[in-house]
Amino acid sequence: MKAYLIPGNKESLKSRDYQAVLNMYKELGYKPKFVQIDWKYKTIDDWVEQVKAEIPKNDLKESILSGFSWGSMIVLTIAANYINPKKLLLYSLSPYFAEDLPHVKETWLKWAGKRRVVTFKKLYMNELAVRINCPTVIFVGSKEVSKYSDMQRRTREAHKRIKGSKVIEIEDVKHDVGDPKYVQAIRKELR
């Protein structure tokens, strides 16, 4: 089975220890693939199309689809609007859906840019969640805090909305899927 990994905002394979996650997938018998995103001057609509172009529909049905931070928003959108994978893994789901934006600080909205914010305003978690019909696990570090938004609240809300989903909170971990404790939590879940 293939295991696709989508990175976080403006990140590449070398931005953090994504290789540890890919190696763990391989050790467990999966065929890992890191999907590089062209982030510059793009919105979530563009990123979703980039990932769809990299993953054949038939592969996706029989694969693990995982993403970190903004990558988790991308894979959730793909699963809801394109095709549900065999398993969906959301690593540190970003809180920038339409329902979240009223709670996000103005400085983040300016940093993200008008075009991105416009597309995030059209992305409703409540609508996407009802179209997720595959095993879904939402991972979050116990120390994931942001001065701009509330990741813990987004995790709880997503869990309530995605039927049959599961939350795994990783103790003493910040916003870093490459943290050895984070990788170990994923490994434990996939065994």
Image (tube, rainbow, N blue to C red):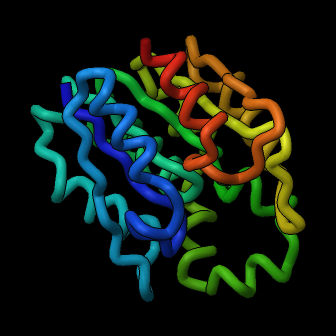
Name which residue lies at 17% across and 48% down: 55
Where residue 124 appears, as percent x and y from the top left, is 60, 48
Which image quarter holds the C terminus? top left
Evaluate whether residue 61 shows in this view.
no
The residue shown at (67%, 33%) is 158
Q: Quadrant of residue 154?
A: top right
Question: Which residue is found at the position 84% from the left and 60% from the top?
Answer: 146
Residue in the foreground of this view, choosing between 103 and 186: 186
Of the 4 image quadrants, the one containing the N terminus is top left
Seen in the image, is 23 located left or right of residue 118? Answer: left
How many marks overall? 0
Residue 12: x, y in percent?
41, 69
Up/down of 18 relative to 82, above or below: below
| Residue 5, placed above or below residue 103 | above
The answer to whether 10 appears left or right of 151 in the picture is left
Question: Is 169 on the left or on the right of 63, as rendered?
Answer: right
In this picture, residue 28 sits left or right of residue 66: left
Residue 41 placement: quadrant: bottom left
- Judge by depth and name the residue closer to the eye, 33 or 150: 33
Q: Is residue 152 visible?
A: yes
| Residue 95 in picture, x, y percent from top left | 71, 53
Residue 83 lies, with reference to residue 67, above or below; the image says above
Q: Residue at x 31, y 27 (%)?
A: 27
Residue 151 in picture, x, y percent from top left: 77, 47
Quarter of the image where one finds residue 30 = top left
Task: Establish if 151 lies above or below 87.
Answer: below
